[in-house]
Amino acid sequence: MTQFDFIGYALPDICRSIGLLGFVTYVANYACLSLRVFTSEHITYFSLNIVAATCVLVSLTQDFNLASALIQSFWIVMGGVAVALRIRKRTRERRAILALLDRGQGAAGDAEAPIRPVAEELPVGRQGERA
Protein backbone atom coordinates (compact mmCIF):
# COMPACT_ATOMS: atom_id res chain seq x y z
CA MET A 1 0.00 0.00 0.00
CA THR A 2 1.39 3.38 -0.95
CA GLN A 3 1.39 6.31 1.43
CA PHE A 4 -0.20 9.48 0.10
CA ASP A 5 1.73 12.62 1.02
CA PHE A 6 0.41 16.13 0.64
CA ILE A 7 3.02 18.79 1.30
CA GLY A 8 4.75 16.50 3.76
CA TYR A 9 1.60 15.37 5.59
CA ALA A 10 0.25 11.83 5.39
CA LEU A 11 -3.40 11.30 4.36
CA PRO A 12 -4.45 9.93 7.78
CA ASP A 13 -3.11 13.06 9.46
CA ILE A 14 -4.95 15.31 7.00
CA CYS A 15 -8.21 13.41 7.52
CA ARG A 16 -7.87 13.57 11.29
CA SER A 17 -7.23 17.31 11.08
CA ILE A 18 -10.37 17.75 8.98
CA GLY A 19 -12.25 15.78 11.64
CA LEU A 20 -10.98 18.15 14.33
CA LEU A 21 -12.14 21.06 12.20
CA GLY A 22 -15.57 19.40 12.14
CA PHE A 23 -15.55 19.14 15.93
CA VAL A 24 -14.67 22.84 16.25
CA THR A 25 -17.46 23.70 13.79
CA TYR A 26 -20.01 21.68 15.80
CA VAL A 27 -18.98 23.37 19.06
CA ALA A 28 -18.93 26.88 17.57
CA ASN A 29 -22.31 26.29 15.93
CA TYR A 30 -23.87 25.11 19.18
CA ALA A 31 -22.32 28.03 21.08
CA CYS A 32 -23.79 30.48 18.56
CA LEU A 33 -27.18 28.82 18.93
CA SER A 34 -26.99 28.88 22.74
CA LEU A 35 -25.86 32.52 22.83
CA ARG A 36 -28.62 33.47 20.36
CA VAL A 37 -26.23 34.68 17.71
CA PHE A 38 -28.65 32.92 15.41
CA THR A 39 -31.70 30.71 15.93
CA SER A 40 -32.52 27.24 14.76
CA GLU A 41 -34.57 28.86 11.99
CA HIS A 42 -31.44 30.29 10.33
CA ILE A 43 -30.09 28.41 7.34
CA THR A 44 -26.62 29.14 8.74
CA TYR A 45 -27.24 26.80 11.68
CA PHE A 46 -28.08 23.84 9.45
CA SER A 47 -25.36 24.67 6.91
CA LEU A 48 -22.71 24.62 9.64
CA ASN A 49 -24.08 21.29 10.90
CA ILE A 50 -23.71 19.88 7.38
CA VAL A 51 -20.14 21.17 7.14
CA ALA A 52 -19.23 19.78 10.57
CA ALA A 53 -20.77 16.38 9.86
CA THR A 54 -19.00 16.18 6.50
CA CYS A 55 -15.65 16.98 8.13
CA VAL A 56 -16.15 14.31 10.79
CA LEU A 57 -17.25 11.83 8.12
CA VAL A 58 -14.01 12.51 6.21
CA SER A 59 -12.01 11.70 9.36
CA LEU A 60 -13.91 8.43 9.68
CA THR A 61 -12.33 7.24 6.44
CA GLN A 62 -9.14 6.70 8.47
CA ASP A 63 -10.55 5.61 11.84
CA PHE A 64 -13.89 4.04 10.96
CA ASN A 65 -16.70 3.75 13.48
CA LEU A 66 -20.08 2.62 12.09
CA ALA A 67 -22.19 4.35 14.74
CA SER A 68 -20.42 7.66 14.21
CA ALA A 69 -20.66 7.32 10.42
CA LEU A 70 -24.42 6.74 10.69
CA ILE A 71 -24.87 9.74 12.98
CA GLN A 72 -22.87 12.01 10.65
CA SER A 73 -24.82 10.76 7.64
CA PHE A 74 -28.07 11.50 9.47
CA TRP A 75 -26.95 15.07 10.24
CA ILE A 76 -26.00 15.64 6.60
CA VAL A 77 -29.37 14.36 5.30
CA MET A 78 -31.49 16.16 7.92
CA GLY A 79 -29.48 19.37 7.50
CA GLY A 80 -30.09 19.26 3.76
CA VAL A 81 -33.81 18.71 4.29
CA ALA A 82 -33.95 21.58 6.82
CA VAL A 83 -32.13 23.97 4.46
CA ALA A 84 -34.44 23.01 1.58
CA LEU A 85 -37.55 23.57 3.73
CA ARG A 86 -36.35 27.00 4.84
CA ILE A 87 -35.47 28.06 1.31
CA ARG A 88 -38.91 26.90 0.16
CA LYS A 89 -40.58 28.84 2.99
CA ARG A 90 -38.63 32.02 2.15
CA THR A 91 -39.55 31.70 -1.51
CA ARG A 92 -43.25 31.33 -0.66
CA GLU A 93 -43.13 34.32 1.70
CA ARG A 94 -41.42 36.50 -0.92
CA ARG A 95 -43.99 35.50 -3.52
CA ALA A 96 -46.78 36.32 -1.05
CA ILE A 97 -45.27 39.75 -0.36
CA LEU A 98 -44.94 40.45 -4.08
CA ALA A 99 -48.54 39.36 -4.63
CA LEU A 100 -49.69 41.68 -1.84
CA LEU A 101 -47.71 44.55 -3.31
CA ASP A 102 -49.14 43.89 -6.77
CA ARG A 103 -52.68 43.69 -5.35
CA GLY A 104 -52.10 46.92 -3.43
CA GLN A 105 -51.33 48.79 -6.68
CA GLY A 106 -55.00 48.70 -7.70
CA ALA A 107 -56.53 47.80 -11.03
CA ALA A 108 -54.34 48.60 -14.04
CA GLY A 109 -51.81 50.43 -11.86
CA ASP A 110 -54.34 53.03 -10.67
CA ALA A 111 -52.33 55.64 -8.76
CA GLU A 112 -55.44 56.63 -6.77
CA ALA A 113 -55.94 53.14 -5.28
CA PRO A 114 -55.09 52.89 -1.56
CA ILE A 115 -52.12 50.76 -0.62
CA ARG A 116 -52.65 48.62 2.46
CA PRO A 117 -49.74 47.99 4.83
CA VAL A 118 -48.10 44.70 3.90
CA ALA A 119 -46.99 43.91 7.46
CA GLU A 120 -50.59 43.36 8.60
CA GLU A 121 -51.01 40.42 6.23
CA LEU A 122 -47.67 38.69 6.79
CA PRO A 123 -47.62 35.44 8.78
CA VAL A 124 -46.71 35.84 12.43
CA GLY A 125 -43.92 33.67 13.83
CA ARG A 126 -43.34 32.45 17.36
CA GLN A 127 -43.68 34.87 20.27
CA GLY A 128 -45.57 37.38 18.15
CA GLU A 129 -42.54 38.26 15.97
CA ARG A 130 -43.01 38.78 12.26
CA ALA A 131 -41.74 35.79 10.31
Image (spheres, grey):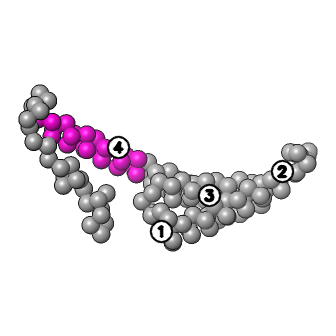
Q: Is residue 83 magenta?
A: no
Residue farthest toward the top in the current orientation of the protein = 108
Q: Earlier in the sequence, mark 4 or mark 3?
A: 3
Which residue position holds label 3? 53
Q: Position of residue 45 (x, y in %)?
A: 51, 59
> Quick one: label 3 or label 1, which is nearer the N terminus?
1
> Residue 99 versus residue 47: which sits nearer the camera?
99
Inter-mark Cα distance, 1 to 2: 37 Å
Q: CA distance from mark 2 to mark 4?
A: 42 Å
- Tell me the SS state at disc 3: helix
**What range of the chain is rendered magenta?**
85-106
Cα separation between marks 3 and 1: 22 Å
Please state which of the two labelled residues, at mark 1 or mark 2, is closer to the viewer.
Answer: 1
Q: Nearer the viewer, mark 4 or mark 1?
A: 1
Q: Position of residue 51 (x, y in %)?
A: 61, 54
Mark 3 or mark 2: whose residue is earlier in sequence = 2
Question: From the viewer's perspective, is residue 37 above or below residue 102?
Answer: below
Q: Which residue is mark 1?
A: 36
Q: Main secondary structure of the magenta part?
A: helix
Residue type at tag 2: Leu
Residue type pointed to by label 4: Thr
Q: Are marks 4 and 1 in contact (CB under 8 Å)?
A: no
Residue for point 77% across, 58% down: 17
- Side of 81 relative to 99 (left or right): right
Q: Residue at x 64, y 53 (%)?
A: 54
Which comes sooner in the sequence, label 4 or label 1?
A: 1
| Residue receiving disc 4 | 91
User: Which of pointers 3 and 1 indicates the residue nearer the eye?
Assistant: 1
Residue bearing mark 2: 11
Earlier in the chain: of badge 1 and badge 2, it is 2
